[in-house]
Amino acid sequence: VNNTSERPSSMALVGPSKTPAVSYHKHNFPVIGQVAAMYSACTANCLTGAGTTWASQVIISEAPGANGGPGHYMSMITDPSTGWPRVAYQDANSTTESYATCTDGAGAATCDKAAGTWSVGSIDPVSTSAGTYLSMAITAAGIPSVSYFNSAAGLVRLATCTGGCGTAATSSW
């Protein structure tokens, strides 16, 4: 998580052990010419900082297109009802504000080890201008809200999840 092609954006403590985790935008990953929204979790020496190691995984990756691709203006928060990360970000390719959720897979494939399963969905699928400066908050019941600046309209907007909030691909806003 220390490279010139990475743009750290947001940090949260995730899982039952409150593992430090970060979300960020990365260029040329997983291959040259791709951009990605990334997630990394600390795997060793998290409290001391000396010799800290990280495990990383791709939330979503695509060709950058004319506008830069996914993962800009990321905001990450921990869902208090599950302990797992929830991420909001700008997808400049599709000009939408996007929402991603991590859930545990089988065995050791857990979000706090950057080995969970990510689901991605749109917050504002009819937007014609990707929102910038996203900020996310979440209720104790796990209901997220995302504020963002819509530059085309010149307005700050607030979107609140109205259903299926635990799995981004099926969430309604």
Image: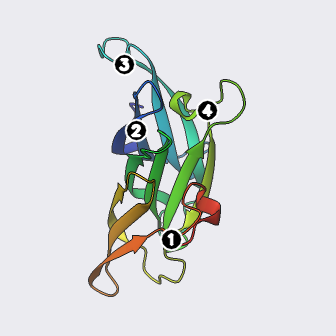
How many C-alpha atoms fall within 10 Å of the one at disc 1: few (<14), some, or many (≥20)?
A: few
Q: Which mark is residue 46?
A: 3
**Structural distance between the alpha carbons of marks 1 and 3:** 36 Å
Residue bearing the label numbered 1 = 162
Residue bearing the label numbered 4 = 115
Query: The disc labelled 3 sits on which kind of residue?
Result: Cys
Query: The disc labelled 4 sits on which kind of residue?
Result: Ala
Which quarter of the figure has residue 7?
A: top left
Query: The disc labelled 2 sits on which kind of residue?
Result: Val
**Structural distance between the alpha carbons of marks 4 and 3:** 17 Å
Dot placed on the residue nearer the N-terminal end, 4 or 2:
2
Q: Is mark 3 on a helix, strand or loop?
A: loop
Percent across and percent down for residue 40 are 48, 34
Judged left or right of residue 14, residue 120 is right
**Image: 71 above or below 47:** below
Residue lying at 42% horizontally and 70% vertically, measured from the top left: 160
Percent across and percent down for residue 77 are 38, 47
Query: The disc labelled 1 sits on which kind of residue?
Result: Thr
Q: Is mark 4 on a helix, strand or loop?
A: loop
Dot placed on the residue nearer the N-terminal end, 1 or 4:
4
The mark total stands at: 4
Residue lying at 64% horizontally and 62% vertically, measured from the top left: 169
Residue bearing the label numbered 2 = 22
Judged left or right of residue 120, residue 128 is left
* Camera sees residue 69: no
